[in-house]
Image (cartoon, rainbow, N blue to C red):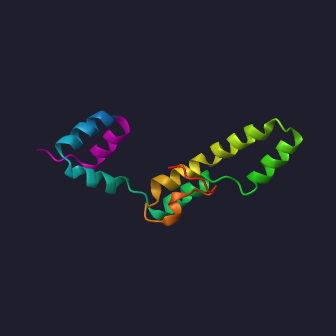
């Protein structure tokens, strides 16, 4: 069987996922190769975490706005949850399951 190039696998990943899936069904050894090709360096994971992290003063800003209009309390809580969703997603996807603290996110809730 013909071995596909790294460039072909990466191209299929972004443009033809169904073709890639069929290929991986036929050549499961390419799964590890594709994972190595798409693996993010720790610096990239850190940078992504920083880019999706909520600003340090988000809590104060939301609380001050809720004091102005009490009807915003529920909306503010939803906003805060949504704003932190990107960070929590990166944390779940890119951290190993070995850390005991992974069970709880920064809010102390267990989202798993």
Count of numbered labels shown in the rendering: 0
Residue at left 56%, top 56%?
49
Q: Tell me what residue is drawn at x 32 percent, y 34 percent.
A: 16
| Residue at image point 86% right, 38% down | 69
Residue 11 x, y percent position in the rendering: 33, 41
Q: Report x, y in % for residue 82.
A: 63, 42
Left or right of residue 57, residue 64 in this image? right
Does the stretch in magenta take in 7? yes
Q: Of residues 67 and 110, which is closer to you in this image?
A: 110
36, above or below 17, in the image: below
Q: Is residue 22 left or right of residue 103?
A: left
Q: Identify which residue, 45 or 59, lies in the foreground.
A: 59
Residue 107 vertical position relative to residue 70 in the rendered view, above or below: below
Instruction: Give x and y (percent) for residue 87.
Output: 58, 52
Of 91 and 14, which appears nearest the observer? 91
- Which residue occupies the extreme left position in the image? 1
Q: Which contiguous range is marked in magenta?
A: 1-15
Q: Mainly helix, strand or loop, the magenta region?
A: helix
Side (left or right) of 17 relative to 75: left
Magenta includes 104? no
Q: Position of residue 74 (x, y in %)?
A: 74, 38
Quadrant of the drawing holding the N terminus: top left
The part of the image, by quadrant, that contains residue 65 is top right
- Residue, x 88% and y 41% (percent of image)? 68
């Amino acid at each position: 069987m013909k071995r596909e190039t790294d460039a072909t696998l990466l191209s299929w990943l972004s443009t033809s996922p169904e073709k890639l899936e069929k290929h991986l069904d036929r050549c499961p050894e390419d799964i590890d190769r594709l994972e190595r090709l798409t693996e993010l360096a720790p610096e990239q994971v850190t940078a992504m975490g920083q880019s999706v992290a909520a600003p340090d003063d988000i809590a104060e800003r939301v609380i001050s706005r809720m004091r102005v209009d009490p009807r915003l309390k529920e909306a503010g809580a939803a906003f805060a949850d949504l704003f932190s969703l990107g960070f929590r997603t990166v944390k779940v996807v890119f951290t190993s399951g070995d850390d005991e603290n992974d069970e709880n996110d920064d809010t102390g809730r267990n989202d798993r």
